[in-house]
Protein backbone atom coordinates (compact mmCIF):
# COMPACT_ATOMS: atom_id res chain seq x y z
CA UNK A 1 0.00 0.00 0.00
CA UNK A 2 1.32 3.48 -0.89
CA UNK A 3 1.87 6.27 1.63
CA UNK A 4 -1.60 7.64 0.90
CA UNK A 5 -3.30 4.23 1.12
CA UNK A 6 -3.68 3.76 -2.65
CA UNK A 7 -2.62 0.41 -4.09
CA UNK A 8 -1.56 0.17 -7.74
CA UNK A 9 -2.99 -3.25 -8.57
CA UNK A 10 -1.78 -3.05 -12.18
CA UNK A 11 1.84 -2.56 -11.06
CA UNK A 12 1.53 -5.46 -8.62
CA UNK A 13 -0.16 -7.81 -11.12
CA UNK A 14 3.05 -9.10 -12.70
CA UNK A 15 1.82 -8.29 -16.19
CA UNK A 16 4.42 -7.78 -18.93
CA UNK A 17 3.38 -5.27 -21.57
CA UNK A 18 4.55 -5.36 -25.18
CA UNK A 19 4.04 -2.25 -27.27
CA UNK A 20 4.12 -3.25 -30.93
CA UNK A 21 4.95 0.34 -31.88
CA UNK A 22 8.49 -0.42 -30.69
CA UNK A 23 8.83 -2.76 -33.69
CA UNK A 24 7.37 -0.34 -36.22
CA UNK A 25 9.63 0.02 -39.29
CA UNK A 26 11.70 3.18 -39.08
CA UNK A 27 13.52 4.83 -41.93
CA UNK A 28 13.01 6.43 -45.26
CA UNK A 29 11.32 4.35 -47.97
CA UNK A 30 12.38 4.26 -51.60
CA UNK A 31 10.68 2.50 -54.49
CA UNK A 32 12.49 0.75 -57.32
CA UNK A 33 9.88 0.40 -60.08
CA UNK A 34 10.85 -2.05 -62.79
CA UNK A 35 8.38 -0.30 -65.11
CA UNK A 36 11.06 2.30 -65.75
CA UNK A 37 13.27 -0.36 -67.37
CA UNK A 38 10.74 -2.00 -69.70
CA UNK A 39 11.23 -1.89 -73.46
CA UNK A 40 8.11 -0.34 -75.00
CA UNK A 41 6.46 -0.69 -71.59
CA UNK A 42 6.14 -4.43 -72.12
CA UNK A 43 9.30 -6.48 -71.75
CA UNK A 44 12.59 -6.40 -69.94
CA UNK A 45 15.61 -6.81 -72.20
CA UNK A 46 18.48 -8.34 -70.27
CA UNK A 47 21.33 -6.48 -71.97
CA UNK A 48 19.62 -3.07 -71.64
CA UNK A 49 18.59 -3.77 -68.06
CA UNK A 50 22.11 -4.75 -67.04
CA UNK A 51 23.48 -1.58 -68.58
CA UNK A 52 20.85 0.57 -66.87
CA UNK A 53 21.74 -1.00 -63.50
CA UNK A 54 25.44 -0.30 -64.11
CA UNK A 55 24.53 3.37 -64.67
CA UNK A 56 22.20 3.50 -61.64
CA UNK A 57 23.00 6.03 -58.93
CA UNK A 58 22.75 3.64 -55.98
CA UNK A 59 23.42 6.43 -53.49
CA UNK A 60 19.71 7.27 -53.83
CA UNK A 61 18.97 4.02 -51.96
CA UNK A 62 21.61 4.38 -49.23
CA UNK A 63 20.24 3.38 -45.78
CA UNK A 64 16.67 3.22 -47.11
CA UNK A 65 13.97 0.58 -47.00
CA UNK A 66 13.50 -0.32 -50.65
CA UNK A 67 10.39 -1.80 -52.28
CA UNK A 68 11.17 -3.44 -55.62
CA UNK A 69 8.15 -4.00 -57.82
CA UNK A 70 6.59 -3.32 -61.20
CA UNK A 71 3.66 -0.90 -61.26
CA UNK A 72 2.41 -2.07 -64.66
CA UNK A 73 1.16 -5.41 -65.85
CA UNK A 74 4.27 -7.01 -67.31
CA UNK A 75 6.03 -10.32 -67.00
CA UNK A 76 9.21 -9.74 -65.04
CA UNK A 77 11.74 -12.60 -65.03
CA UNK A 78 12.97 -13.69 -61.59
CA UNK A 79 16.57 -12.92 -62.47
CA UNK A 80 15.62 -9.23 -62.73
CA UNK A 81 14.83 -9.11 -59.00
CA UNK A 82 18.09 -10.91 -58.32
CA UNK A 83 20.06 -8.38 -60.35
CA UNK A 84 18.41 -5.46 -58.55
CA UNK A 85 19.31 -7.07 -55.23
CA UNK A 86 22.97 -7.37 -56.23
CA UNK A 87 23.12 -3.60 -56.76
CA UNK A 88 21.00 -2.46 -53.82
CA UNK A 89 21.99 -4.90 -51.08
CA UNK A 90 25.33 -3.23 -50.33
CA UNK A 91 23.68 0.16 -49.66
CA UNK A 92 20.01 -0.33 -48.71
CA UNK A 93 18.92 -1.05 -45.14
CA UNK A 94 16.32 -3.54 -46.37
CA UNK A 95 15.05 -4.72 -49.75
CA UNK A 96 11.83 -6.58 -50.48
CA UNK A 97 10.07 -7.65 -53.65
CA UNK A 98 6.71 -5.93 -53.39
CA UNK A 99 5.02 -2.58 -53.03
CA UNK A 100 5.34 -0.13 -50.11
CA UNK A 101 2.59 -1.84 -48.08
CA UNK A 102 4.34 -5.19 -48.45
CA UNK A 103 7.66 -3.57 -47.56
CA UNK A 104 6.14 -2.17 -44.36
CA UNK A 105 4.68 -5.53 -43.38
CA UNK A 106 7.86 -7.46 -44.20
CA UNK A 107 10.14 -5.17 -42.22
CA UNK A 108 7.67 -5.07 -39.31
CA UNK A 109 7.59 -8.88 -39.18
CA UNK A 110 11.38 -9.03 -39.47
CA UNK A 111 11.60 -6.68 -36.48
CA UNK A 112 9.20 -8.87 -34.48
CA UNK A 113 11.39 -11.89 -35.21
CA UNK A 114 14.04 -10.25 -33.01
CA UNK A 115 11.94 -11.06 -29.94
CA UNK A 116 13.26 -13.89 -27.80
CA UNK A 117 10.05 -15.75 -26.89
CA UNK A 118 11.79 -17.55 -24.02
CA UNK A 119 11.98 -14.20 -22.20
CA UNK A 120 8.19 -14.44 -21.84
CA UNK A 121 8.08 -18.05 -20.61
CA UNK A 122 5.43 -18.45 -17.93
CA UNK A 123 4.58 -14.73 -18.01
CA UNK A 124 1.25 -12.96 -18.26
CA UNK A 125 1.64 -10.78 -21.36
CA UNK A 126 -0.46 -7.82 -22.46
CA UNK A 127 -0.14 -6.71 -26.07
CA UNK A 128 -0.78 -2.98 -26.01
CA UNK A 129 -3.87 -2.08 -27.98
CA UNK A 130 -3.80 1.69 -28.41
CA UNK A 131 -1.10 3.91 -29.76
CA UNK A 132 -0.13 6.70 -32.10
CA UNK A 133 0.50 4.45 -35.12
CA UNK A 134 -1.78 2.05 -36.87
CA UNK A 135 -0.60 -1.50 -36.35
CA UNK A 136 -1.95 -4.06 -38.82
CA UNK A 137 -3.55 -7.37 -37.88
CA UNK A 138 -0.50 -9.22 -39.24
CA UNK A 139 1.57 -7.92 -36.29
CA UNK A 140 -0.96 -9.01 -33.65
CA UNK A 141 -1.21 -12.43 -35.27
CA UNK A 142 2.58 -12.81 -35.38
CA UNK A 143 3.19 -11.75 -31.77
CA UNK A 144 0.52 -14.21 -30.66
CA UNK A 145 2.09 -16.97 -32.75
CA UNK A 146 5.49 -16.24 -31.22
CA UNK A 147 4.33 -16.08 -27.61
CA UNK A 148 1.58 -18.72 -27.44
CA UNK A 149 3.97 -21.66 -26.93
CA UNK A 150 5.66 -20.02 -23.92
CA UNK A 151 3.44 -17.39 -22.29
CA UNK A 152 1.20 -18.23 -19.35
CA UNK A 153 -1.42 -15.93 -20.83
CA UNK A 154 -1.79 -13.38 -23.61
CA UNK A 155 -4.13 -10.43 -23.41
CA UNK A 156 -4.92 -7.49 -25.65
CA UNK A 157 -5.47 -3.91 -24.52
CA UNK A 158 -4.11 -1.94 -21.59
CA UNK A 159 -3.06 -3.48 -18.26
CA UNK A 160 -6.09 -1.88 -16.57
CA UNK A 161 -8.55 -3.20 -19.18
CA UNK A 162 -7.64 -6.30 -21.16
CA UNK A 163 -9.31 -8.79 -23.45
CA UNK A 164 -8.13 -12.35 -22.76
CA UNK A 165 -6.75 -14.00 -25.88
CA UNK A 166 -4.97 -17.12 -24.61
CA UNK A 167 -4.45 -18.87 -21.31
CA UNK A 168 -2.34 -21.98 -20.79
CA UNK A 169 -4.32 -24.96 -19.62
CA UNK A 170 -3.57 -25.93 -16.03
CA UNK A 171 -2.39 -29.51 -15.64
CA UNK A 172 -3.86 -31.64 -12.86
CA UNK A 173 -0.31 -32.16 -11.53
CA UNK A 174 0.15 -28.36 -11.31
CA UNK A 175 -3.01 -27.99 -9.20
CA UNK A 176 -1.76 -30.52 -6.64
CA UNK A 177 1.40 -28.52 -5.95
Image: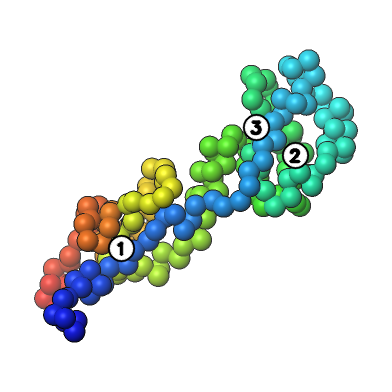
Label 1, label 2: how many angstroms apart (C-alpha)? 41 Å
Residue projecting furthest to the bottom: 3
The secondary structure type at the circle numbered 3 is strand
Residue at (17% x, 76% y) in the render: 7
Label 2, label 3: how many angstroms apart (C-alpha)? 10 Å
Choose between 3 and 88: the one closer to the eye.
Answer: 3
Residue at (83% x, 38% y) in the render: 56
At label 2, counting other C-alpha atoms closer than 10 Å, the crowd grade (few under 14, some 14-19, many 20 or more) is some
**Label located before the other in sequence (2 or 3):** 3
The picture places residue 82, in percent across and down from the top left corner, at: 73, 39
**Label located before the other in sequence (1 or 2):** 2
At label 3, counting other C-alpha atoms closer than 10 Å, the crowd grade (few under 14, some 14-19, many 20 or more) is some
At label 1, counting other C-alpha atoms closer than 10 Å, the crowd grade (few under 14, some 14-19, many 20 or more) is many
- The residue pinned by badge 3 equals 69
| Residue 24 in view of the camera | yes
Would you place residue 29 above or below residue 44 in this image?
Answer: below
- The residue pinned by badge 2 equals 84
Residue at (40% x, 70% y) in the render: 119
- The residue pinned by badge 1 equals 125
The picture places residue 134, in percent across and down from the top left corner, at: 42, 44
In the picture provided, is 36 more to the left or to the right than 29? right
- Asked if the residue under mark 2 is in contact with the one under mark 1, i.e. CB atoms within 8 Å, the reply is no
The secondary structure type at the circle numbered 1 is strand
Amino acid sequence: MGADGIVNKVAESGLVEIDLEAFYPEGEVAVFDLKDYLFMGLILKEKDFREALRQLDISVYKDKLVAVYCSVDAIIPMWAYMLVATYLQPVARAIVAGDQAFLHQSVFLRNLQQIDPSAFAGKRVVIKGCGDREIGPFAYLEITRLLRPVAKSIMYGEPCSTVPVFKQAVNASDKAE
